[in-house]
Amino acid sequence: MAIHYRQTAVCAGIALAFGLTAAGAWAQGTGATLGEVRVDANAEKESATAPVVGYRARNAATATKTDTPLSETPQSVTVITRDQLVDQGASNLQDALLYAAGVRSDAYGLDSRSDGMRVRGSYPDVYLDGLRQNYNWYTSVTRSDAYTLERIEVLRGPSGMLFGAGTVAGVINMGSKRPLQEAQREVGVQLGSWNRRQLQADLTGPLTKDGEWSYRLVALARAADTQVDHVPDDRRLIAPSLAWRPNAATSLVLQAHWQQDRSGSTSQFFPWSGTLLPNPNGQLPLSRFIGEPGDHYDSDRESVGWLFEHRFNDNWTVRQNLRLARNENRGVYHWGDFYTVLGGFGSDPVNQRVLGRFYDESLTRTRMAAVDTHLQGNLSTGALRHQLLLGVDWNRQTEDKATASAFSTIDAYAPVYGNLVTAPLDASPRNVQRQSGIYLQDQMKWGNWIFVAGLRHDRAVNSLAGSADDRTSDTTKRLGVMYQLPGGWTPYISYAESFSPVSGINKQGQRFKPLEGEQIELGVKYVPEGSGTQFTAAVYDLKEKNQKIADPVNAGNTLQAGQTRNKGLELEYKGRVATVFDLIAHYNYTDVDPTLEGLPRHQAAVWGVYRFAVGGVRGFSAGAGYRWLSSFRDGSGPTVPSAGVVDALLAYDTPQWRYALNISNLADKQYVSTCLARGDCWWATRRNVVLSATYRF
């Protein structure tokens, strides 16, 4: 990634810290200029939305919807800052979470259609600026670009009390870049593997001398191929925003986003045979494409909205986030017939060359409106201090979809294109999903004790044209207790719940109950005062009931009697070991319920960046990371071997320029990311090299 900003106020002047070395100068009233200095962001007051210098954020908002120190949050939260996104060269959400604790970011390897992630064994909900992005997979979503983001917060575990209907995995909340009141402008270029060519720009600053009005414009254009033949990765986007800050108490940020993706499906759904298991013809190439040239997976997304905040006084604040979005996806692609247990080569069981393939065409149009309004109040009852939050939120998604499918065959080892079998599109009934909720939260402090308690009630409606509405209501709770020990240690215990509506009825005409999840988490956080160190350790017990299971008595009927249970341990470290070395590391142990999709029991990752001078010239930095996961299997599927991957960075910064070379999967390790019990395997991403240059002015 080629562009980022670092700034902080020092005394009466402003220190501009550009690049990894934060080289620059600051001026006092006398006009004296000093040499290069490195500004330590740990000494500065931070917020949950402002830019952060370095990898370690002090505050986050996703776990409480308030600007709360992570050391006072009784639940596991990981924050990926802008600096980390830049250093690691992340271009999408999946890349950005490769070094996040509790996350299996590459659960489905390279998938150009969507970011496939697992958190604590389940699928998280994705939010942007505190508002839900979408309800469904693939055909209702456009992938977010990391270049438009200031930070990413991962709340691990149920979050129903704050966000309503959702999974037990928690929430991934992306924070957009916002207008700054000081001019900072950058343009950059990227060249890389698979014929990657990208231009990007990030411009921000004041529109008026007093800073009352400020703007930001983020734009990007990319033309690229992928490691799979005939699958492009082209993108154009523009994200303007305008901020109005008439005084210190009021701010309104108007946002817009337009994005156009032209891609295809890198996922070929290859069978076990020829990927993980032997095939008499050898291994299928990672670049193999079994569709037809011209297949595509295109999406267009437009959105507008605002972020509003007004402080009535020192004690009471009101906020409202609103967004209206429209998404259109048009897809034509083929995928392998992995259902045949004998390796998917049911059309050619002897030679195992001819693979069945499905033709899949879809046209999906979605409209989504979301708004969240809450009132925050600070008050005291004796020695007990309260931070109250009373809020209401509402969202609605309308989906119109038409699909078509057909079947053909192809020689997977020597494909000859042109044998195309198609079918006409068939429109599905319009689907409308609505949710509204009201919530109350109290964050309390009493001496060294910290308490968080919350209660929420939701109503969710799933409407399918021609059918009766499926209505669900639920009440969710949370409770957390922390104790601040000397030296920066804060042990805690917390309880949280989630619910997720389940559509449909059983053979008796009874509607299914919503999935209901609960989690108990026990942990400790270490954040010593005045230090750049942050360490967290947590163990959790996560349950979800009302899972759908087959009726053992009545064939074809479905019951809700199942309960899943995931348990695990997570360790995470972030900090500045010395003034020239930043380090992050984590270890996950995940004991996934055997009825759920398999995951590695063990995951570990470490990433470090060292900054140095050459011949007295400052601004150089070198980084390296190692990601490892243990072997695992999904149900009756084959065992996926353990794998370790090395990533690397080499960069040079001046106040005006940044040059960087990012290499992921340095050794070009070719391995399978996962193999599912249903019969298919997914290749992991091969070596990817990106050279970037950025000019700041």
Image (cartoon, rainbow, N blue to C red):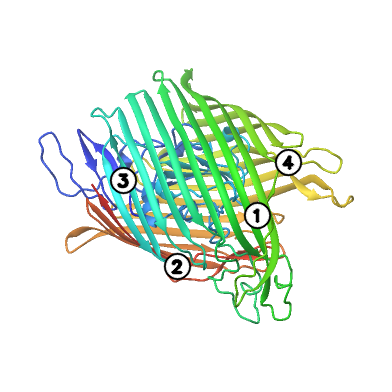
Disc 1 and disc 3: Cα gap in Å? 40 Å
Discs 1, 4 touching: Cβ within 8 Å: no
Q: Depth-wise, is mark 1 or mark 3 nearer the camera?
A: 3
Element class at badge 1: loop
Task: Tell me residue 578's x, y (percent).
Answer: 31, 53
Question: Taking 537 as reference, is 648 above or below it?
Answer: below
Tell me the number on the disc at residue 672.
Answer: none
Which mark is first along the chain, 1 or 2? 1
Q: Which residue is tagged 1?
A: 592
Q: Is residue 190 left or right of residue 430?
A: left
Q: Nearer the viewer, mark 1 or mark 4?
A: 4
Query: The residue tagged with tag 2: helix, strand or loop?
Result: loop
Mark 2 sits on what residue? 687
Pair 3/4: label in front: 4
Q: Earlier in the sequence, mark 2 or mark 3?
A: 3
For the residue marked with disc 1, what is the amino acid? Val
Residue 503 tag number:
4
User: Is the residue under label 2 in contact with that under label 4 (CB below 8 Å)?
Assistant: no
